[in-house]
Image (cartoon, rainbow, N blue to C red):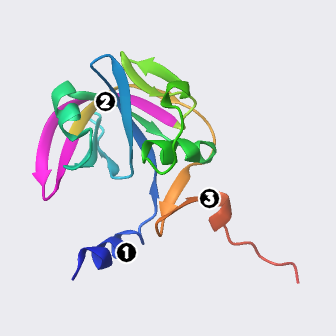
Amino acid sequence: MDSRFFRDAMEKFATGITIVTTNYNDEIIGMTVNAFMSVSLDPKLIAISIDEKASMYDKLQNTKKFGLSILSEDQKELAMIFARQIEKDRQKIPYIELDNIPVIDNSLAAMSCYVKDTAKAGDHMILIAEVTQINMGQGDPVLFFGGKYRSIASNKHTKSNK
């Protein structure tokens, strides 16, 4: 099977959208990531998967820490900015710090994470990190399905009153 066919099949799985951020050489850098999962409650571990071609691939392995922000549907534009789908001034992005790590302000949930382990998986690196602090927000998530950003409201089925 070719890579496009495999990717099309993977797009059948709806995911939330996260932004992974870190402070690297006194500059906040970030990227859109939808390969994220909860791993363990004790200790509190999450995992993200980063493509070896991503600009943050080596940087995250060097800093060994990152912020993870789960985006709301109102933050879809941020996902597009960090995925380099649209150009906007990143200096105006609202950040807060959790455990001295930058995260996106007003996200559904944001957490500071310290890398505990890595695993090479094909052309990606899986980073397993311990969560040290969490900030919770409100709202509905932005979703990614079929290669498009979506919201829960746009995917709800309504019954007609006939």
Q: Amino acid at mark 1?
A: Asp
**Tag 2, which secondary structure?**
strand
Whole-percent x, y for residue 93 in the image:
53, 29
SS of the residue under disc 1? helix
Neighbor class of circle 2 (other Cα within 10 Å; few <14, some 14-19, many 20+) is many
Is residue 120 shown left or right of residue 35? left
Find the distance from the CA under tag 3 to the CA under tag 1.
21 Å
Residue sitting at 68 percent across and 72 percent down? 157
Q: Quadrant of the C terminus?
A: bottom right
Residue shown at the point (56%, 26%) measured from the top left: 92
**Where are the magenta residues, as a range?**
109-127
Pointer 2 residue:
66
Q: Which quadrant of the view contains residue 154?
A: bottom right
The amino acid pointed to by label 2 is Phe
Closer to the N terminus: mark 3 or mark 1? 1
Question: Helix, strand, or loop for circle 3?
Answer: helix
Report the residue marked by disc 1: 8
Seen from the viewer's position, the closer of residues 30 and 128 is 30
Residue that label 3 marks = 152
